[in-house]
Amino acid sequence: MGKPCQNLRAKWDDEAMENCMRAVERGMSQRKASERFNVPRRTLRNHLKTGSNIRKLGRGSVLTKQQEKDLVTRIMRLAEVGYPVTPKIARHQVFRFCEANNIPHKFQIEKETAGKAWFKLFRKRNPELSIRKAQNMNPAMAQKLNKFIVNDYFTKLESILDEMDLKNKPERIFNMDEKGCWLTLHHQQIVLAKKGVKRLHLVASEHAQNVTVVGCVSAIGSAIPPMVIFKGKRLKPEFLDNLPAGTTVKMAPKGSMTTELFIDFVQHLAKFKLPGSILLIFDGAACHLDYEIVEAADQHAIKLLCLPSNTTHELQPLDKSVYRSFESHWDQEVLRYWDQHPDRVITKPRFNIIFSKVWSKRMTQENIISGFKATGIFPFNPSTIPEAAFAPSIPSSLHQARIDEDDDDDDDENIPLARVAENTRQSQEENNKQTNTDGSRELNVSFHELLETPNKLDDKPKAPRKKSINYKAQLVTRAVFIENLTDNVPSTSKAPIKQTTSTKSLPTSSSVPSTSKILSVKLTPITKSVPSSRSVAGKQITDSKKCFLCDSCRVIDMRTCRSCKEWVHDECIGLTLSDDEEFECPKCEK
């Protein structure tokens, strides 16, 4: 074996070169200075010519320091706004940059990309860059988590907390959310195997049944017993075994939350809350927004605050803390259970055993309190949301001037998405005027032009569309649904709306408009016929079905007078649902 090669070049450091150059400037000869500071005389002569004391070996880099700095800045900026650059794209853009600006290089012209060796040295020269695995983000999440919507949410939250006097009462601030849990593993696992093996499998079901777990916690760090929703129709006794104390179990056709089950959850929450009013914060899923839910919440003194859509990953306490690593803990318990049960089958009763262990690990007081703190709910702190969280919304940000105009209006549901602010574009144009380090000439193409921030703006005109109830934060009250109902009253000049078939047809004299969507919330189909003089609450009411006593079309039970056929509310005449007899209105009785 030959003698290992020793590096005999550049045994001096920058400090020795600087001292040597100073000695020569003070009158010492180059030979004497070279011997005293152990710097080669020829090397000293070259550094005296350039005036630099920095040690530099080998060929210079293709890009100057300033150009590499600009490239690093663009890469980091695109990563901030949610459009990170892959190594291959970066190498390709460097090749294009060199070609456009006539910079000599030895890159592969056939592949039109910079080499891997260049990229390796580029990363070494710029250690602030790292290679990471990006997490996909829904475009709606990137768009909706902007400062305007978040500030609007905290303004409404503060107003509600002040009105209910809850800023110092964390035991009355609640958050609920569902968590889907598969009866199998959620993620790929790290396992042991022979080194170099090419095929490695873990035998487990890919498509398993989903079970919905509904958790609810308070800002003081306590949690009420969960609600578990299994897929199916018949609730078997064994489905109730081995669950946390107080857990309620429900069945659903798809194993997910419905409006009826959410009403059951509100009643479940009422059993464990303190006497008096509480605030319940939740996401705006369609099954959470219904007039009947508001009625059930009002009966138990529960105020409902709906979070803005596509912002729960930053604004919902359960998502930020308890549910964040729920799937990882679930997988660990599943693997431990499989180790003890070789059949590796997770049934619904077995789900209860695994779930109880995971629930006790994740639903701790420390986790719950940290979730409310991280979202700025308690202690109330809007500045908790970091600036980096808003960066992905920049390409589709709201135009500040348009927002200010719309803020003057009462209808904040019609605020449109606007263009990126003009000053942002101007700053981009200024950055395009990039020059070399020596400032001798202007570049033909800059990295800012090659790696532009995507402009998520659509210039195509779109038909106006009514915003959903959870477009922004919304205190869910009866008025929200009544206002939407009146907005959806069909005009007489429009074409008739296609009727939705129900399981049983109603008598002609009591026909009502077809079941319609109220703020994207489906009403349950009518399965029983109703008396001829009745109108079911929640159906679409036209002008002819206004109560002539109170002159309103509120979404409550109504009936018609047998003489004049006018519509009146049950509560206006003192009747209830159990009163099925025909009646005469006060006008006809006279």
Image: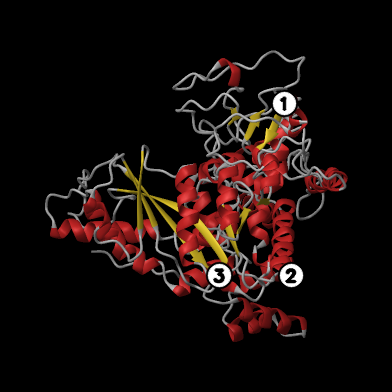
- Name the residue at the left extreme: 342
Q: Nearer the viewer, mark 1 or mark 2?
A: 1
How packed mark 2 is, by other alpha carbons closer than 10 Å (few <14, some 14-19, many 20 or more), is few
Residue that appears at 57% across and 17% down: 499
Q: CA distance from mark 2 to mark 3?
A: 80 Å
Q: Are marks 1 and 2 in contact (CB under 8 Å)?
A: no
Residue that appears at 20% across and 59% down: 337
Q: Can you say whether 127 is above or below 556 in the image?
A: below
The percent coordinates of residue 144 (x first, y second) are 66, 46
Near-viewer residue (174 or 550): 550
| Image quadrant in which you'd find residue 41 | bottom right
The answer to whether residue 571 of the structure is visible from this angle is yes
The percent coordinates of residue 8 (x first, y second) are 46, 71
Identify the residue under disc 2: 51
Q: In the image, what residue type sits under mark 2?
A: Gly
Disc ID at residue 566: 1
The percent coordinates of residue 7 (x first, y second) are 44, 69
Residue that appears at 86% across and 44% down: 409
How packed mark 3 is, by other alpha carbons closer than 10 Å (few <14, some 14-19, many 20 or more), is few
Near-viewer residue (428 or 475): 475
